[in-house]
Structures are given as structure tokens and as C-alpha cells.
């Protein structure tokens, strides 16, 4: 990773920040009073894809964690999957597309495709948390700190940051509070393609929303 001084920074193909999926609409407000990462639900175990033309986010923080699914809690031990967790105090997204493919009895593979923020008004989110496995895009960070402990980010000190679970699968994510983290006053992302496990938000407004179901996988966002 190249050395970066405090101030405006541009990293091409930066694979640690991401764009929200519409899964946030099913998780609004869950556990945010205690930190979204301590929410007492498990992920579905199914990835979804999100593509966005442009995202502007303020109050950005990022750190590592482990998402736990229902299947991960079966048996004697608890397993999970590593994720990069990003949070934004506020975010605006334009030209957003989310898709998820599900195997349906008799029908086979069905793609749910949702678009939003394609007109004059963007998608708007508050207290946004994103759990991703993969991301490609361009990013610009303003006033960035790299290498701080997760527990010492501004979001954590404000009561919305990393929360430590009991390690028994009762929370969605297990976060290493003393682990590597970074934060920035503002993050701007363009031409983003993301694979994610979960998204939560305090509020999530989808302007110009359109939802369609398609047979097969040809209509995925990317």
C-alpha cells in the first residue's frame, strides 16, 4: 500500500470501501443504539451484488470483522466469513443497482434486480454499515487516518462503532476492537462494483426505485 499523507487521496481499485445494498431496508434500526455491529441477527449466508456510479459519504470508518450465518452456528462450534466493514454517518448514492440470484423450486434461478437513484434525486442513507467480501472502483479520501485501532475511530467514540460480541454467534458480526482500522472525513467512490453479505442503516431512502424479477442470471448488475 502506498504511503499517504493527511489530506486528499485517490486510490484506484481500492478494495476496502463499498456501496450499500437494498438489504438495508430489511434491517433498518436494528441494534443501532448499541452499534449496528452488535445487532442480534445472523446473515442469510447468501451474497448479493451492488453497482453504483457515484457515492459520497461523510464520517467514514472501516475495520475487519466476521459475519455469522445460521448455518455457521450449527454443530459444536461457530464459524463465519471474514468481511471488511465500512460505516458512514451520511451517504448519497447515484445510479445504484442491486441484484441477488436465488434458486427457486421448479422455476430454477431467479434474479431480483433493483435500481434506485437514477433520476434527479440520489439514494440517501444515515448511519450506514456495510459488510463486504469484494469491491472494485475508484476512491478519493479527504482527511484520512490509516492504522488507527478500530475502537479509537470517531464512529466508535460516538457510540456507533465496533462492538465486541460474546463469540457465541449471538451477534451478526464479531469485531476485533483493537484491530487495524482507518477513517476519513469524506470518501467519494465512482464506478463501484461490490459483492456484499449484509447492509444495515438507520434510514435508507430509495428515490426512483424499480424492482424486477428475471429468469436466469443474465440480468445481474455485473
Image (cartoon, helix red, strand yellow):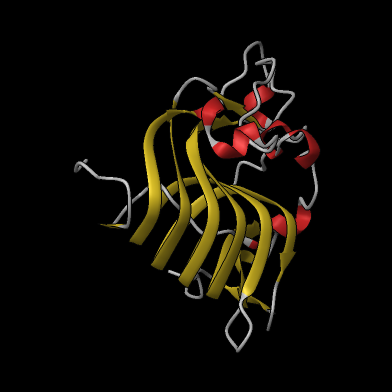
Quadrant for residue 12, please give it: bottom left
Where is residue 85 shown, x and y percent of the image?
52, 41
For image coordinates 35% across by 49% down, the residue present is: 15
For image coordinates 42% across by 29% down, the residue present is: 148
**Residue positioned most to the top:** 76
For image coordinates 48% across by 40% down, the residue present is: 62
Where is residue 61 shown, x and y percent of the image?
51, 43
Please indicate, yes or no, whether residue 84 appears anywhere in the rendered image: no
**Residue positioned most to the left:** 2
**Residue positioned most to the bottom:** 120
Answer above or below: position of 161 versus 26. above
Name the foreground residue: 158 vs 176: 158
Going by the image, does 76 lie left or right of 32? left
Please indicate, yes or no, whether residue 153 appears anywhere in the rendered image: yes
Answer above or below: position of 133 versus 163. below
Going by the image, does 199 lie left or right of 193? right
Going by the image, does 35 lie left or right of 80? right
Going by the image, does 22 lie left or right of 190? right
Q: How many marks?
A: 0
Quadrant for residue 23, please give it: bottom right
Q: Which part of the image, by quadrant, shows the C terminus? A: bottom left
For image coordinates 80% across by 43% down, the residue present is: 30
Quadrant for residue 90, please give it: bottom right
Where is residue 20 shown, x and y percent of the image?
58, 58
Where is residue 60 shown, x and y percent of the image?
52, 49
Q: Which part of the image, by quadrant, shows the N terminus? A: top left
Amino acid at each position: 500500500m502506498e504511503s499517504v499523507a493527511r489530506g486528499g487521496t485517490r486510490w484506484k481499485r481500492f478494495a476496502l470501501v463499498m456501496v450499500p445494498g437494498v438489504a438495508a431496508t430489511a434491517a433498518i434500526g436494528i441494534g443501532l443504539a448499541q452499534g449496528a455491529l452488535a445487532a442480534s441477527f445472523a446473515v442469510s449466508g447468501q451474497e448479493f451484488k451492488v453497482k453504483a456510479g457515484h457515492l459520497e459519504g461523510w464520517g467514514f470508518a472501516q475495520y475487519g470483522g466476521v459475519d455469522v450465518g445460521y448455518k455457521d452456528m450449527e454443530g459444536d462450534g461457530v464459524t463465519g466469513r471474514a468481511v471488511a466493514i465500512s460505516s458512514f454517518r451520511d451517504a448519497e448514492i447515484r445510479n445504484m443497482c442491486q441484484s441477488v440470484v436465488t434458486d427457486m423450486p421448479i422455476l430454477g434461478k431467479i434474479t431480483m434486480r433493483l435500481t434506485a437513484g437514477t433520476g434527479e434525486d440520489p439514494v440517501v442513507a444515515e448511519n450506514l454499515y456495510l459488510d463486504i467480501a469484494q469491491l472494485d472502483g475508484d476512491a478519493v479520501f479527504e482527511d484520512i487516518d490509516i492504522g488507527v485501532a478500530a475502537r479509537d475511530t470517531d464512529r466508535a467514540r460516538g457510540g456507533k462503532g465496533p462492538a465486541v460480541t460474546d463469540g457465541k454467534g449471538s451477534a451478526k458480526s464479531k469485531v476485533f476492537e483493537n484491530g487495524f482500522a482507518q477513517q476519513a472525513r469524506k470518501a467519494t467512490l465512482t464506478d463501484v462494483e461490490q459483492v456484499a453479505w449484509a447492509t444495515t442503516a438507520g434510514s435508507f431512502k430509495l428515490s426512483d426505485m424499480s424492482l424486477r424479477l428475471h429468469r436466469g442470471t443474465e440480468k445481474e448488475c455485473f
